[in-house]
Image (cartoon, helix red, strand yellow):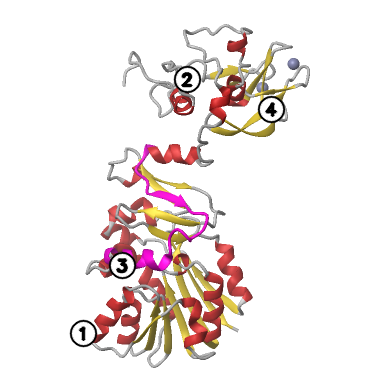
Amino acid sequence: MTSSEYVACFYCSEYAKVATDYPQNFASQDKDTFTPRCFLHWKFECHKCGKETHFNGIAWCSDCEVFTCLRCAEEKMVRKEFLIYDYYYNIPCHKCNSPNPALDFAEYYGKHPFQIGDLIPKEDIVIWMPIYKEDLESQEFPHKSWGSERILDIGNAHRHTRLDSSDEYNPESVWDKMAENWISPETEGEYHHTTIILPEVYRLLEAQKDEKILDVACGEGTVARYLAKIGVKVTGIDISKMIERAIGRENEDKLGISYVKMAAEDLSKEFEKESFDKVVCNMALMDIEDYKTTIKKISYVLKKDGTFVFSITHPAFAWPTTTSMRVPPDSQRNEDKRKIALNYFDERPTLIQFGWDTPSLAFTRPVSKYVNELVKNNLEILEMSEPEASKEIVEKYPRQAYLDNDTLPDFLMIKAKKK
Ligand SMILES: [Zn+2]
Ligand SMILES: [Zn+2]
Ligand SMILES: [Zn+2]
């Protein structure tokens, strides 16, 4: 990109998506970045500290004819939906102390110094006069995560949709539809499962011959079959039709596993109190909406001193809290990949589109929620694990592991003992 080329101002183009009469100025600043800016949407010099400040962090006082930046005054956040924002800063003038809105809102309100003629722009720009304010108020307001969305748009991140409840998407039906995608001969050979997750789950579980182990949300039976092969008496339960595949495999090659198609929340209806030595729940608790009842029921069926091992996608570093993107989007090199953290505290169900027809449904929640639920149900944490890709794994699977699982954990495992 050469500096003689005309580049649209990022802010002008974003504002025009909401205010259709918004003029489009060419960028004269930051032309080679993702956010080229016109002179109106550039920086202004604070008359107190002399610092050049982004237009959204500096306010003009028409009475004193001075700029004050938010470093030089105690700004107040005013919640107000306008243009592409849902708040602006009110910044007290450093001379007279009267509050003035930062230039983003000032422009929207028609009080920008260029609009009222207090200042004449040094560069040739078209000034917007917001006369259709009433219409603008009724525009659909962009989501608060606009900032993250904009960053995600640069790359090719998976799309997330937060639902206000799971009513729209019944987890059982989603998993049934997804079963075809997950159930494939390659599933067991998948890098994350074979390399990062399963070895760690098996290490934590320390399964012994003749132990009675319950596999909660057993899916197609990968863990159950592994355990049965070392002599464990395994019971697998799952609500989705993936269990049909597990049953099919058991019928083809009998290992003595008993499978029950049922919800994890109903464990106490099917099994006696303290009837299992161990319970394992591999990569499923984050897909279970009522994790509280599930943990309670797991504790119920577990013997005293029995252990419960579960693995989940890492609540802080894996989707849907965090998504990864690449810039440029088609780059295959991991140094071009970055993780973007979204809202860690948002516990609404999330639909994630992986590019298949059927989205995945996840119930994300902070780590503390799991830990506190264990504590509440008499389960004492013995070990917590955030597996990191070893040098050997990085050597063997560089495209998956390098600057990825050797940098941030995608998974979290907890081993707890019933007291
Ligand atoms: Zn602009
Ligand atoms: Zn200042
Ligand atoms: Zn003033």
Residue labelled 2 has its Cβ within 8 Å of some atom of ligand 1: no
Between 314 and 98, which is closer to the camera in this rendering? 98
Say which label, 4 or 1, has the lower sequence index: 4
Residue at mark 2 to residue at mark 1: CA–CA distance: 67 Å
Contact, mark 4 vs mark 1 (Cβ under 8 Å): no
Q: Nearer the viewer, mark 3 or mark 4?
A: 3
Q: Find residue 270 and name its label.
A: none
The x, y position of residue 133, in whole percent, is: 57, 23
Between 118 and 42, which is closer to the camera in this rendering? 118
Q: Which residue carries the number 3 mark?
A: 179
Residue at mark 3 to residue at mark 4: CA–CA distance: 53 Å
Say which label, 2 or 1, has the lower sequence index: 2
Q: Which residues are magenta?
A: 154-181
Q: Nearer the viewer, mark 3 or mark 1?
A: 3
The amino acid at mark 2 is Tyr
In the rendered image, the quadrant that contains the N terminus is: top left
Q: Find residue 22 and name its label.
A: 2
Q: Which residue carries the number 4 mark?
A: 90
* Vertical comparison of 378 with 288: above or below: below
Which quadrant of the view contains residue 8?
top left
The amino acid at mark 4 is Asn
Structural crowding at the residue carrying mark 3, measured as other residues with C-alpha within 10 Å and reported as few (<14), some (14–19) or many (≥20)? some
